[in-house]
Image: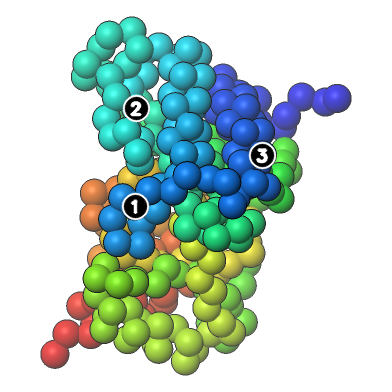
Amino acid sequence: MAPPALNTPLVNVMRAAALKCARAMVRDFTEIEQLQVSRKGPGDFVSTADKRAEQLLVRELGKARPGFGFLAEEGGVHPASDGNAAPTKRWIIDPIDGTTNYLHGIPHFAISIAAEEEGKITAGLVYDPIKDDMFVADRGNGAYLNDRRIRVSARSRMPDSLFATGIPFMDRGDHVLFNAQLAKVMAVSSGVRRMGAASLDLAYVAAGRYEGFWESGLSPWDLAAGILIVREAGGLVSDYDGRDEVMTSGNVVAGNQSLHGDLRTLVNPKNFKA
């Protein structure tokens, strides 16, 4: 078997950890009725599978890179396994992005892993174990889907374009703002999709499946890997004001170079204020 097209050290470490984690995750998914589910908050479920997947990723990634710390969805901040309490390198991980899909038996979820060094994302992986779609990127070396180089869509007209988003629910987010954003995008595009896994939405933008994606209130582990994958595929990622502050604001607009600006203008909250 030929070696992977993107064969850098960090990507190889992430790939091995994700594949090992995925085996148990898929096994649990096929036995979804037997999962022990607890509530972490309104509409925010966490399963034994989620916790187990994170523990496995922390163990495997920590073994391969003991000098890296962790920022993880379930466990928060972990020090590096070599004892460094404030490492300048860390893994940012979401063991199951799309937990609600997972627990409802919907086969659309992903493992998301990013390497951050000196404040910059240097490698990213988003792996959909059900479809066996592995999106990877290494800073300066491009983005790949299953060892095939990917690029963002070349479409340049809104009426030809498909977009993705996330919908606020229960007491989360600004429902009025979202409805206004959605109405604006629906009026000029060929459609909007809400699939429930932000890391895969970003990866799909990178692969040209969507022309763009926007969402508010996301966390670093939802975004880190996908941001790099989109940029290495030739796309643009910013917050609503065009700044490179997505990881701190939690607000993201991603798209190809032709349509990113148009989408950002359509959904910018400032354009809905009286």
Category of crowding for the residue at label 1, using alpha-carbon neighbours closer than 10 angstroms: few (below 14), some (14–19), many (at least 20): few
Circle 3: element type: helix
Which residue is identified by label 3?
Answer: 27
Residue 26 position within the rendered picture, expressed as x and y whole percent measured from the top left? 65, 42
Rendered view: 65 above or below 10: above
Q: Quadrant of the N terminus?
A: top right
Number of numbered discs: 3
Residue 164's disc number: none
Q: Horizontal placement of 168 versus 228: left or right?
A: left
Q: Amino acid at mark 2?
A: Phe
Which residue is identified by label 1?
Answer: 39
Camera-nearest residue between 8 and 79: 79
Discs 2/1, front: 1
Q: Horizontal placement of 99 versus 148: left or right?
A: left
Instruction: State the image quarter where residue 7 is shown.
Output: top right
Category of crowding for the residue at label 2, using alpha-carbon neighbours closer than 10 angstroms: few (below 14), some (14–19), many (at least 20): many
Rendered view: 43 above or below 113: below
Instruction: For the residues labelled 2 and 3, say whether their Cβ atoms are less than 8 Å apart.
Output: no
- Cα separation between marks 1 and 3: 22 Å
Q: Residue at x 51, y 39 (%)?
A: 49
Q: Amino acid at mark 3?
A: Arg
Instruction: State the image quarter where residue 274 is shown.
Output: bottom left
- Cα separation between marks 2 and 3: 26 Å
Discs 2/3, front: 3
- Residue lying furthest top in this view? 82
Which residue is identified by label 2?
Answer: 70
Q: Amino acid at mark 1?
A: Arg
- Cα separation between marks 2 and 1: 24 Å
